Amino acid sequence: QTDVLIVGAGEAGLGVATELRDLAFGGHIMVIGGEPYLPYQRPPLSKGFLEGKEDEDNLALRAPAFLDEHDIEVLQGRRVVSVDLADEGGTATLDDGTTVQFEKLAFATGARARELPVPGASLAGVYSLRTIEDAKQVRSALVDTARLVVVGGGFIGLEVAAASRRRGLEVSVLEATPRLLGRVCAPPLSDHLMTRHAAAGIEIRLDTSVVELMGDVDGQVTHVRLADGTTIPADVVIVGVGALPNVELAEKAGLECGRGIVVDEAGRTSIDGVVAVGDCAEQPHPNLPGQRLTIESVNNALEQSKLAAHVLAGVETPRRGVAWFWSDQADLKIQIAGISDGYDAYVVRAESARLTVLYFQQDRLIAADVVNNPRDFMAVKRALGEGRGVDPDRADDLSLSLKELLQ
Ligand code: FAD
């Protein structure tokens, strides 16, 4: 009998296991991961790994020795195909037919890349980027490539575009909405990124929907056809149009699911003794009462797994830290503190290549997007953690540093 079974060996799954040990939890912990790798970091896959600066060996989240020392059993390359929940605990069935009896369960099944719903999406030369396998394929496909088309102007799409442009490729980014990162930030950051990426030689087309990927007789992608009928040539197409939380297993086990597995602030699902953490979990919205959201970030995976481990260990949960996120796009370092979704006003502080966008909800500071200004990022992150803010009417005063203004 396993005391805690964790399904999914990513940032969140491993986070639950290590946090349980930090809490001196002495029971048997088993983490089952569908990929044939020890738990690894995904962020470098669209950054340093793609540029050839980082290798597979640098990606591991923890060394095998750490897992041994902490007595965390990781079963790699095995998928859980069904979960039967009993009054207390339950049984998981694996893809090789074996079963694991558990007392408590954590879903940390992550998300998968959303596919482009157009004809030709499965041609050779069309990739998405979620796993090491994807990244290896993309990296070798880019070696002899002249023209890359990236579909989607979100974080992953822009990171891939920037890294590939640095490698000397001709790069186009096609974004269906009127601006980059439209779902997650205010227009000033979208405009700033647009200007900077264009200056680096990346062609960005907004309001541009892809209706078909076209290939040659060998089934290799050659062109992308747009809604206005034009076609643009492509040797490789990378699709970055969002992620879908992996909820099917939890749904079949009877857990309440929306876009993700529905959880409370501490990761408790609709069933006692079962938690869900990371990209697969849908949590209460911090700014919009009654609404819920999924968050795809390393920080969220770690914060949620910390709280959920407290729940599993039966100890009081600590206060959650301030949400944060980063994205590296060539020489642009984007850092985000807090959650801006739900803002009703924003204030911009801009100085040459630096940009800080402060988000407010009813005059209360809730978040900041920062480009190439780690000091502003740190100042806002700290202030949010301490419940401090800034008067929106004074927030654009560049004669004072943001740190001085935050009180
Ligand atoms: P995952 O990392 O997806 O892990 C879930 C694991 O569960 C997977 O290995 C999956 O195979 C396994 N699994 C699923 N179902 C089963 C099953 N039934 N049985 C067994 N195993 C199963 N975040 C940032 O904060 N900053 C960044 O710069 C950044 N860059 C990113 C770049 C890329 C290319 C990607 C893909 C993500 C990036 N992220 C970034 C997001 C961040 O990596 C994720 O939020 C984080 O990895 C989520 O961790 P997770 O453990 O919830 O899910």
Image: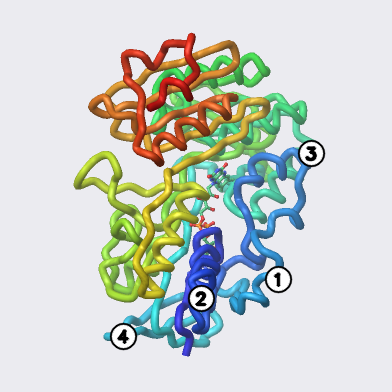
Tag nearer the camera, 3 or 4: 4
| x 55%, y 68%: residue | 18
Numbered disc 3: secondary structure: loop
| x 57%, y 31%: residue | 158
Circle 4 residue? 88
Q: Tell me which amino acid carries mark 4.
A: Glu
* Image coords of residue 177 (percent x, y): 41, 26
Q: CA distance from mark 3 to mark 4?
A: 53 Å
Q: Quadrant of residue 4?
A: bottom left
Circle 3 residue? 143
394 w.r.t. 232: above or below? above
Badge 3 crowding class, 10 Å Cα cut-off, few under 14, some 14 to 19, many 20 or more, is: few
Q: Tell me which amino acid carries mark 1.
A: Pro
Relative side of 56 to 352, left or right:
right
Tag nearer the camera, 1 or 2: 2
Q: Is residue 142 visible?
A: yes
Q: CA distance from mark 1 to mark 3?
A: 32 Å
Numbered disc 1: secondary structure: helix
* Image coords of residue 271 (percent x, y): 27, 72
Numbered disc 4: secondary structure: loop
Q: CA distance from mark 1 to mark 2?
A: 20 Å
Q: Quadrant of residue 69?
A: bottom right
Q: CA distance from mark 4 to mark 1?
A: 32 Å
Question: Which mark is drawn over residue 29?
Answer: none
Numbered disc 2: secondary structure: loop
Circle 1 residue? 64
Disc 1 and disc 3 in contact, CB within 8 angstroms: no
Q: Tell me which amino acid carries mark 2.
A: Ala
Relative side of 30 to 38, left or right:
left
265 w.r.t. 212: above or below? below
